[in-house]
Amino acid sequence: MKEEKYEHPLVTVVIATYNRADTLDYAIQSCMWQTFKNFEVWIVGDRCTDHTEQVVSKYLDDPRVNWYNLPKNSGYQSKPNNEGIKRAKGKYIAYLNHDDIWLPNHLEDNIRHIEATSADFVFSIMQWVYSFTYSQADIPLLPDLPRPPEATAVVHKKSVVDTIGYWKDIHETYAYPRTEFFRDAQKAKMTFEIVPSLTSLKFLWDEKNYHDVGPQPIYMERLRKEPDYVNKEMSQMLIRAYQELGRVPSFKRFKLQVSDMLRATLFKRNIDPARLKFWMGKGGQIRVWRKRHGLKETVANTEVSEPATAENPQTVKG
């Protein structure tokens, strides 16, 4: 079968980060080993104060890699993401969280699919790694359900921000900004496509060990040494999913299914499900999340970042 031809447009990879230098190192490594080579990287710190810049500096000899540290901490990935998008030269935007890992095929599979379908957004299958021994697949059913995909699994046209705007600040939305970003895209009738490939790994972090590295080194080594990693992991995840279907439904799973159905019904009637918790106020869900994870409360940030110049000490360009 003749391989399908497709263009190799420039892709801008945005890595928002805050004081996770050791896990960030693995994320950058996974970006640099992509089979798709036509990309630039903007690593944007949310006013990092650890050794993040030292880690990033190892990669700045590559002209595709760029680094910018925001002058003020914003408390969420919205502002770093927006900074990366504004500086982007690519036709497409791809996100990579600072503690996640891309498989080598991530950009190749997603760009091939978005070029073939002309979709506004594409997102691929993600493996959630809960511990050193347990993981499961994540396949959001967007746009049929309002639960959005994780940013690490997403590629979208840069031009979508001309219609729906940038990621909202945490103090401007009732929902998580990531959720709001995708809901705005749904409301604008933008198109979403699922890429039928496992291309990324998401690692859950513990607030008690925020700065520690988890299973990332082990999985990176496996990916390097096991060429059949994807097939083995997908087989195991399919087996677990089949076993789960055969079990008596738990109350927790039933509650989640009812919640998803309710949210989907509300959304189809142009009612934002997040507004049901209006008494929390804008930014309320983020405040609760940060408190639960032992993080400080943030204040509204109205500062505008300075442009990238040689005189700006916060900007380092590869």
Image: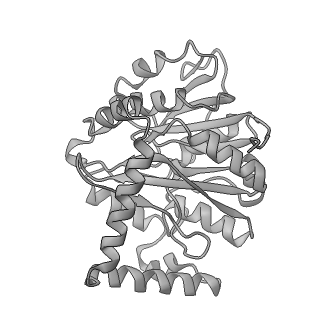
Q: Residue at x 63, y 15 (%)?
A: 311
Q: Nearer the viewer, residue 185 or 248?
A: 248
Outermost residue on the top side: it is 61
Q: Residue at x 63, y 39 (%)?
A: 108
Q: Residue at x 29, y 34 (%)?
A: 218
Place of residue 238 in the rendered image (x, y in percent of width and height, measured from the top left): 39, 63
Is the C terminus in the top left, top right, bottom left or bottom right quadrant? top right
Look at the picture and state if 66 lies above or below 146. above
Q: Is residue 165 left or right of residue 94?
A: right
Place of residue 69 in the rendered image (x, y in percent of width and height, measured from the top left): 51, 29
Q: Nearer the viewer, residue 141 or 185?
A: 141
Q: Residue at x 74, y 58 (%)?
A: 119
Place of residue 194 in the rendered image (x, y in percent of width and height, measured from the top left): 61, 60
Q: Is residue 314 left or right of residue 217?
A: right
Q: Is residue 228 visible?
A: yes
Place of residue 219 in the rendered image (x, y in percent of width and height, measured from the top left): 33, 37
Q: Is residue 70 visible?
A: no
Say which quarter of the image contains residue 265. Answer: bottom right
Look at the picture and state if 53 lies above or below 237. above
Q: Nearer the viewer, residue 67 or 249?
A: 249
Say which quarter of the image contains residue 213. Answer: top left
Q: Is residue 224 left or right of residue 113?
A: left
Q: Nearer the viewer, residue 138 or 182?
A: 138
Look at the picture and state if 215 lies above or below 270. above
Is the N terminus in the top left, top right, bottom left or bottom right quadrant? top right
